Image: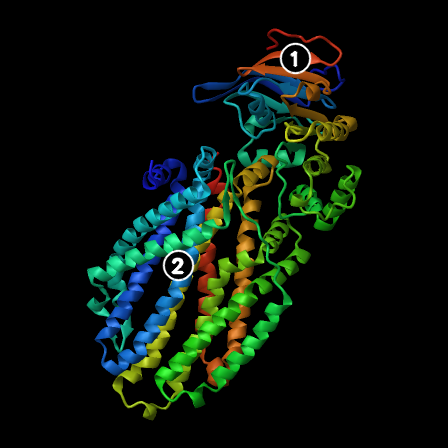
């Protein structure tokens, strides 16, 4: 596999992804390479296929056709398209982290237990999982709030718990879908800083769907979708490639 | 557009809400059929001689009264499930300007309509099961054709089921908030206190006193029955007071020991609302109570010297009471299983977004299902065992050690507990998030 400008082979390599829902084409021949340590923002108007692309890249939903390769350091390349549902579920919990707009935290559990759950599902004993979860929360400025229930946290604190959960397993690729969409601008900026620090700041990749240009501007790279097609791909500090990038 | 028209538009059979609709109608059909079979059995007692009727009819009435509670629980669960299955439509109506009371009325009409469809199906189910039920023996002979009720009784029973469902729907909907944006469950978490434990101990002492003196007090069978039925009522009251406390204690213990994700999640789900957890399994505890106390009561009557009763009909009474206990147990388990299936399905739909989201994050459906199952079965197991033991201690003075060690009572208790748990466990598989939600996605 060819190395890119980051000096690594792409950690995710999507080729000719097609996906349609009835008569609507959500992905129309998307080609994309994502490097290790790179932050990528996916932008586009409503219905352009942003979330469908994120779900496809994360193995949540399979595209109708195309090829999607995962190439993590020190591991054999995996063809995500070839994996059965259970294997993709396992891949998601072991290799990927997720931060969604709604947080998706379990209301009955404490902040610490929500983070520990990601480790416990992967087989870490409870005591060790709780200890690591506590450390992750402290590192994100939530020391003293470990025992709080989700309902006792603010929106920004909830997203920090979600970020802690996404990175506590050591996942090398983190997917985020409008992670600051439900937050005010100040809290949103803080959460974005933390998210970038916990991912690209530690050599991990971040793939983020956002409609906010100021959020996208903080990423290394911005791709734009329209009617399921990738219409531009630009890197920070360079002009947009524009036109057809397929 | 009037309420009836609106209720039909929103509640008519549709593919998107097929699973909850079938589940709700089936549950009402089941309960209606059971109610009719019990009524049929009770109706057959009217052919007995006058003195026998005096003993049998109150017992049959007691069995019917026992059915009302699970029916109410079921009706409330069914109404909440209907509202859940329809949440988007109900929220949209609020957004369009419908008032909270109009929405409640629509939901109640829908629940009553569903109950009516279920009750009609229940009549058919009753007619299908009647030949089998007619083989049950009372007074030494099968019930026979007497199991078939007159048409006017069927009509009243159907009407009663519809009214009860509407009343319990109104009660159940008080726990739901239907806002223009969403339908959500009101969360009020009562904290079970040590006072409940104190009341229980006191209750057990009072009950022990009643049961131990029943032989001296009871001068007639009717008096003895009245004392036993009163004892049952008081016992059930105590049961409902101590239940949430017991569940919270068991939940806390499970939380300490939890090692797997499903154990941790289940313990937290139990502790989230011990009273709600208890309500789901209280029928199983009631079954244990009925099995031990009722079984012992029947054994006590069998031990009563024959000279005290010179009538032929009395010879059959102990055996018939035991039959009644077994029938009541079977009915209780079926009701608990039906209401558990409904409540758990409503719970899964309630958490659909979270469950689907967690699956996207990589949590297997199996883990979520195991946590959900454990959150019901742990309290059920605890309730069964605890109340079987408590009831056994309770009837020690009533029936004496001989009865406690009578194989009949012991076997009844064990079979009751096992049957109840197996049936409830089997019934809640319908609420598996992997099945219920994966098909929606």
What x and y, as percent, mark residue A224?
62, 15
- Regarding residue A10, the answer to whether it shows in the image is no
Q: Secondary structure at mark 1?
A: strand
Name the quadrant containing residue B357.
Answer: top right
Front label number (1 vs 2)? 2
For residue A101, above or below residue A7: below
Q: Are marks 1 and 2 in contact (CB under 8 Å)?
A: no
Rendered residue at 73%/18% (across/down): A220
Q: Nearer the viewer, residue B375 or A87?
A: B375
For residue A1, above or below residue B290: above
Q: Quadrant of the N terminus of chain B?
A: top left
Which chain is disc 2 placed on? B
Q: Is residue A132 left or right of residue B171?
A: right
**Same chain check for tags 1 and 2:** no
Which chain is disc 1 placed on? A
What x and y, as percent, mark residue A128?
75, 47
Q: Residue furthest bottom?
A: B307
Rendered residue at 46%/52% (across/down): B172
Circle 1 sits on which residue? A233
For residue B296, above or below residue A173: below
- Regarding residue A220, the answer to whether it shows in the image is yes
In the picture, the disc for residue B411 is none
Marks counted in the figure total 2
Label 1 crowd bin: few (<14), some (14–19), many (20+), radius 10 Å? many
Label 2 crowd bin: few (<14), some (14–19), many (20+), radius 10 Å? many
Q: Is residue A118 left or right of residue B405?
A: right
In this picture the colour scheme is: rainbow
Q: Is residue B210 left or right of residue A102?
A: left
Q: Secondary structure at mark 2?
A: helix
Circle 2 sits on which residue? B71
Mark 1–mark 2 Cα distance, whole angstroms, equals 62 Å
């Amino acid at each position: 596999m060819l190395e890119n400008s980051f000096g690594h082979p792409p950690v995710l390599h999507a080729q000719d992804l097609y996906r349609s829902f009835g008569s609507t084409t959500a992905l129309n021949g998307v080609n994309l390479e994502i490097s290790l340590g790179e932050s990528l923002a996916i932008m586009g108007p409503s219905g352009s296929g942003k979330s469908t692309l994120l779900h496809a890249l994360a193995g949540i939903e399979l595209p109708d056709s195309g090829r999607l390769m995962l190439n993590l350091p020190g591991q054999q390349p995996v063809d995500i398209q070839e994996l059965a549902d259970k294997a993709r579920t396992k891949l998601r919990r072991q290799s990927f982290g997720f931060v969604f707009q709604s947080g998706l935290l379990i209301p009955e559990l404490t902040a610490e237990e929500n983070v520990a759950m990601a480790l416990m599902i992967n087989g870490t004993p409870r005591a060790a999982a709780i200890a690591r979860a506590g450390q992750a929360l402290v590192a994100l400025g939530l020391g003293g709030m470990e025992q709080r229930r989700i309902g006792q946290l603010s929106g920004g604190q909830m997203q920090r718990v979600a970020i802690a959960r996404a990175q506590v397993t050591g996942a090398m690729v983190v997917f985020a879908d409008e992670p600051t969409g439900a937050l005010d601008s100040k809290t949103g900026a803080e959460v974005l800083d933390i998210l970038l620090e916990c991912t690209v700041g530690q050599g991990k990749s971040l793939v983020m769907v956002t409609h906010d240009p100021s959020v996208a501007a903080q990423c290394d790279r911005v791709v734009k979708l329209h009617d399921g097609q990738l219409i531009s791909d630009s890197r920070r500090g360079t002009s947009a490639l524009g036109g057809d990038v397929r | 557009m009037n309420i009836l028209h609106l209720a039909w538009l929103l509640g008519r059979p549709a593919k998107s809400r097929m699973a909850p609709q079938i589940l709700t109608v089936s549950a009402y059909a089941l309960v209606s059929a059971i109610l009719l079979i019990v009524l049929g059995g009770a109706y057959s007692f009217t052919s007995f001689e006058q003195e026998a009727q005096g003993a049998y009819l109150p017992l049959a009435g007691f069995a019917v009264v026992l059915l009302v509670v699970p029916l109410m629980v079921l009706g409330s669960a069914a109404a909440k499930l209907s509202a859940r299955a329809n949440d988007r439509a109900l929220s949209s109506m609020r957004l369009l300007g419908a008032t909270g009371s109009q929405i409640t009325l629509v939901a109640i009409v829908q629940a009553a309509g569903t109950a009516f469809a279920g009750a009609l199906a229940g009549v058919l189910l009753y007619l299908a099961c009647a030949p089998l039920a007619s083989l049950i023996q009372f007074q030494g002979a099968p019930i026979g054709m007497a199991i078939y009720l007159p048409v006017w009784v069927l009509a009243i029973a159907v009407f009663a089921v519809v009214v009860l469902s509407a009343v319990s729907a109104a009660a159940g909907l008080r726990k739901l908030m239907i806002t223009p944006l969403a339908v959500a469950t009101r969360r009020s978490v009562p904290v079970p206190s040590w006072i409940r434990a104190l009341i229980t101990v006191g209750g057990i002492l009072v009950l022990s006193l009643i049961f131990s003196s029943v032989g001296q007090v009871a001068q007639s069978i009717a008096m003895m029955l009245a004392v036993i039925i009163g004892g049952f009522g008081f016992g059930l009251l105590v049961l409902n007071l101590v239940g949430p406390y017991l569940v919270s204690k068991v939940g806390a213990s499970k939380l300490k020991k939890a090692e797997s994700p499903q154990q941790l999640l289940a313990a937290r789900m139990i502790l989230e609302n011990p009273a709600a957890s208890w309500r789901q399994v209280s029928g199983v505890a009631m079954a244990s109570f009925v099995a031990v106390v009722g079984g012992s009561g029947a054994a006590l009557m069998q031990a009563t010297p024959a000279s005290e009763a010179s009538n032929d009909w009395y010879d059959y009474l102990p055996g018939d009471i035991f039959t009644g206990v077994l029938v009541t147990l079977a009915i209780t388990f079926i009701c608990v299983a039906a209401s558990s299936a409904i409540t758990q399905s409503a719970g899964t739909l309630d958490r659909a977004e979270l469950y689907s989201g967690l699956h996207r994050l990589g949590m297997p459906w199996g883990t979520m299902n195991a946590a959900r199952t454990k959150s019901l079965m742990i309290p059920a197991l605890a309730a069964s065992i605890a109340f079987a033991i408590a009831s056994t201690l309770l009837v020690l003075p009533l029936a004496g050690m001989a009865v406690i060690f009578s194989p009949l009572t012991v076997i009844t208790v064990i079979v009751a507990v096992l049957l109840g748990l197996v049936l409830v466990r089997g019934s809640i598989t319908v609420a598996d998030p992997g099945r219920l939600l994966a098909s929606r996605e």
